[in-house]
Image (cartoon, rainbow, N blue to C red):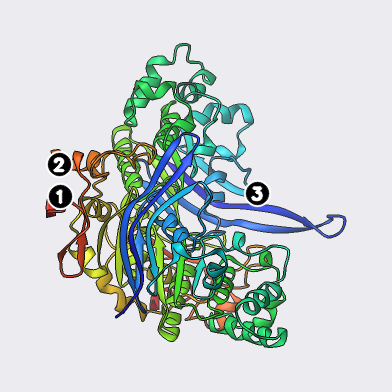
Amino acid sequence: MNDLLKIENLYINFRTLWGVAKVLNGINLTIKEGEIFGLVGETGCGKSVTASTILRLLPSNAEVSGKVLFKGENLLEKSEEEMRKIRGKEISIIFQDPMTSLNPLFKIRDQMVDVITLHNNLSKEEAEKRAKDLLEKVGLPDPERVLNSYPHELSGGMRQRVMIAMALSSNPSLLIADEPTTALDVTIQKQILKLILELKETYGFSVLFITHDLGVVAELCDRVGVMYAGNIVEIAPTEELFENPLHPYTQGLLSVVPDPRYKKKLKPLRGSVPSLLNPPTGCRFHPRCDYAGDLCKKEKPELIEYSPDHFVACHLYGGNSE
Amino acid sequence: MIRVEHLKKYFPIKHGIIRKKTMWLKAVDDVSFEIQKGETFGLVGESGSGKSTLGRTILRLYEPTSGKIYFGDVEITSLTKAELKKMRPKMQMIYQDPYSSLNPRLTVFDIIAEPLKEHGYKNPKERVLELLEAVGLSEEHAKKYPDELSGGQCQRIAIARALALNPEFIVLDEPTSALDVSVQAQVLNLLETLQKELELTYLFISHDLGVVRYLANRVGVMYLGKLVEMGNIDQVFETPKHPYTKMLLDSIPIPDPKLRSLRLQKTVLRGEIPSPLNPPAGCRFNTRCPYAKEICKKEEPQLVEVEKNHFVMCHFAEEM
């Protein structure tokens, strides 16, 4: 499989009133064509910032360095004009709360026709036909009724389906899904996950799936990247990651996920996520790590390929650059 | 310890031009169950199923529409306000969002001392420090304000405040839903330790079935205001008898990628939870149930005991 998106040495700092927040600390990752790549981590680890960087939607107080290569071209060097042709056309995004991504004042019909005509050379009638077609594909059996509705008249699950239909309207090659099912009930979540999987099979796009839920990762993703405090600490195929987690943080994370199948003993990690205004030196996980040594306090471990396709950034596995 | 009999809570919804027509939202509709001393009763269901309303009504934070609630031997639905206030220390509540349930203008010390002063403690300092220690915090946290603390620490403060007056029964309404998994595990372990040490009884409300499996001894499943299945945690999770419970369990993501292909073939629960303003006739689940027959649309099933202590509200419970 070819690489669709390649992030190289990406650093992001936010200048704030309280100092500089170092939110991404040199991350590297690759998304292949046609795969679902899961990005998992706790609040504030930098998963959503990564998504915003890909789409160049960062606020003006952000300082960016590194490369985001999409189909070989660096998105960070594109003009705003060029980006507008990529956003929504080549790369689409769906968010956690579809209510805030849809305009409450307009009917779904107007919003969908707008999006479709923006990226495709179609008349209003053709766009409407396309919209109906898309709504049927995302499992909304009565598209005419949906088109005539305002967002508040639809349920959360239906709104998320509308968002997916809009995101797919110009056949993107990358769909970024930022916690798309977090606001939904489990039975609806399952419907949406299944839908994303089916649509991916049909259209062949890649998915960057951002979530805090390891259960969802296990159900959906081909490969997973684990983030902690602005670093990617481990990347592996999903089964490999769950069976053979290498990084102490990944191991800790897997041991605190409750399992509905049995009463599992939870072994919580001590402490909590550090502030990014003043992150720990060296490996940012070292204050919470049971294996931390002197090297971990001084030097940031690099992401290395420990075994085929399994990457880890930890000094336990020889992650220092020497 | 807690006995609930035929509890109903209906909310009036006024509509029409002059707001004269009243519809009734049946948030809790004829629910009966018991919680034994020292156990954790888990209450699960999707949003809008009535689980939070049930929790609040049991504490009389909402006035029940009808039905009886016994706390030990005392029937609390008929108590006057003053009598109820005397009972309050024994029953406490912990909410989902620790930031909005703590007063941002009080220090941690004052937050925990408030119920103590209200109930006649002259010098609460020693007790506050004792409570902070019990929830894994220290004296230095006492001077801080809630916005200086993390979500997990705030939830510990809320727990300390709930414990201040030595309660016997605590309603926990999604206490870890706003927390990250690593912090959630810390809080769950704390709740478990406190329960053992202080012989507490919990009503644990959650939409997360993994968390319920971890903490609860018995569990009740709610759907549109009705308790549709109830039993020991292992019975309900391992041999669910109600079609809704089965599908709910099939919908939860399992943190094991090897099961994925197997699970994807399972049927997805179709449709969405209907509006509680206008619930379906007959069995309330019949519109989404793959096994629904004629009788399900007409007749409401009763809660029947299918095996010891395992109750199911389904016409075909025996065949499931």
Q: Quadrant of the N terminus of chain A?
A: bottom left
Q: Is residue B125 above or below residue B115?
A: above
Which amino acid does the dot numbered 1 rest on?
Answer: His
Q: Residue B53 location in percent, x, y?
A: 57, 50
Instruction: Place residue A103 in its image quadrant.
Output: bottom right
Q: Is residue A41 visible?
A: yes
Residue toward you, B319 or B140: B140
Q: Chain of mark 3?
A: B
Residue B129 percent location from the top left of the image? 36, 20
| Left or right of B221 on screen, residue A153 | right
The residue pinned by badge 2 equals: A295
Q: CA distance from mark 3 to mark 2?
A: 65 Å
Q: Are marks 1 and 2 in contact (CB under 8 Å)?
A: yes
A198 or B296, which is in the foreground? A198
Q: Position of residue A149 (x, y in %)?
A: 70, 72
Of the two numbered discs 3 and 2 in the rendering, the one whose residue sits closer to the viewer: 2
Tell me the residue that label 1 is attached to.
A315
Mark 1 residue element: helix
Say the numbered circle drawn on residue B65.
3
* Circle 3: element type: loop
Circle 3 Cα neighbour tier, 10 Å, few/some/many (<14 / 14–19 / ≥20): some
- The alpha-carbon separation of the residues under discs 3 and 1 comes to 62 Å
Left or right for A171, reference A20: right
Camera sees residue A258:
no
Output the chain of dot 1: A
Could you tell me the amino acid type at mark 3? Answer: Thr
Looking at marks 1 and 2 on the same chain, the residue that comes earlier in the sequence is marked by: 2
How crowded pointer 1 is (Cα within 10 Å; few <14, some 14-19, many 20+) is rated as many
Q: Residue at x 24, y 38 (%)?
A: A287
